[in-house]
Amino acid sequence: MNQPEIVVISYNTPHRKTQDVLFQLKAKGYRNVSVLALPFVHRENPFKPIFAHRPSKAIDIMPEILCERLHFRFKEIKADEIHAYLNQNQSDFVLIAGAGLLPDELVENHKLINSHPGWLPKVRGLDSLKWAIHNQQPLGVTCHFVDSEADAGFLIEQREVPVYNNDTFHSVAYRQYEIEIDMLVNSIEIIPSRTDFPSLSTSEFEATRRMPKSIEENLMEGFERYKKKFSI
């Protein structure tokens, strides 16, 4: 198996999405993996939605120890240091498993790969699953190279998230999450076979914020309407 140099950007704390990405990389036989761990800031008053839709329970193990056990490299780093690190260290693929806003210098000079839980460019921003249901838009996942525009950049792959008659809101949310992880890791195999990466830049669709609870409280009714419209 060809062994590319893979960098995973994440947080220096137990993080579910990062763990799932690393486990899948290990299962696929990738060995040259480096994890760059950003400081994680715990908010005093974190936002608490009415309906949590992202898997959040991580294995209680610090990423440095997990990387040691997986035989991956590990480095604590600040966001403004990643650009210099990537200039000095070979990398074929840089995956974003967890990060806040990254410096423009970084995203404009390196091909960072993100997997967004929404059909770009129509569904951008936070709570994409919830807004897609609220606005009765198809659910999807978009894997893309990022740039300085929020949830834009250049398309690598898109997949629709199937919805079935017997689905619950949370079963659909978890299916979307699994597709998101799969597409992020799968981009390593897809990118070398592609020559065209269409731009996702748009002024037609605005990025969403957290869904207000006044709208979220009616989300389950919207989900039932959504199933009638889109279920297979």
Image: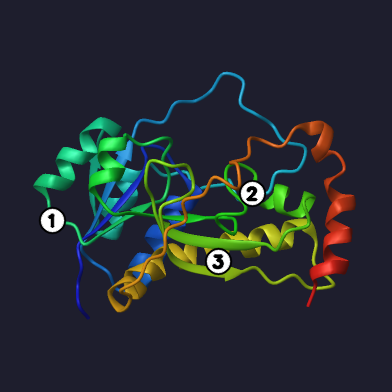
Which residue is the site of mark 1? 90
Q: Amino acid at mark 2?
A: Ser
Q: Amino acid at mark 1?
A: Gln
Label 3 or label 2, whichever comes before in sequence order: 2
* Percent coordinates x, y for residue 76 in the rendering: 25, 36
The mark lying in front, picked from 3 and 2, is 2
**Distance between the alpha carbons at the discs numbered 2 and 1:** 34 Å
Which residue is the site of mark 2? 128
Image position of 190 with respect to 41: above or below: below
Q: Residue at x 13, y 46 (%)?
A: 87
Q: Amino acid at mark 3?
A: Ile
- Please tell me whether mark 3 sits on a helix, a strand or a loop: helix
* Percent coordinates x, y for residue 149 in the rendering: 43, 42
Which residue is the site of mark 3? 179
* Percent coordinates x, y for residue 6 in the rendering: 25, 60
Say whether marks 2 and 1 touch (CB < 8 Å): no
**Distance between the alpha carbons at the discs numbered 1 and 3:** 28 Å
Label 1 or label 3, whichever comes before in sequence order: 1
Res 168 → quadrant: bottom right
User: Which corner quadrant holds the C terminus?
Assistant: bottom right
Q: Residues within 10 Å of mark 1 (few under 14, many from 20)?
A: few
> Is residue 151 visible to us here?
yes
Depth check: 3 or 157 in front?
A: 157
**Distance between the alpha carbons at the discs numbered 3 and 2:** 14 Å
- Please tell me whether mark 2 sits on a helix, a strand or a loop: helix
Residue at the outermost top position: 44
Q: Residues within 10 Å of mark 2 (few under 14, many from 20)?
A: many
- Please tell me whether mark 1 sits on a helix, a strand or a loop: loop
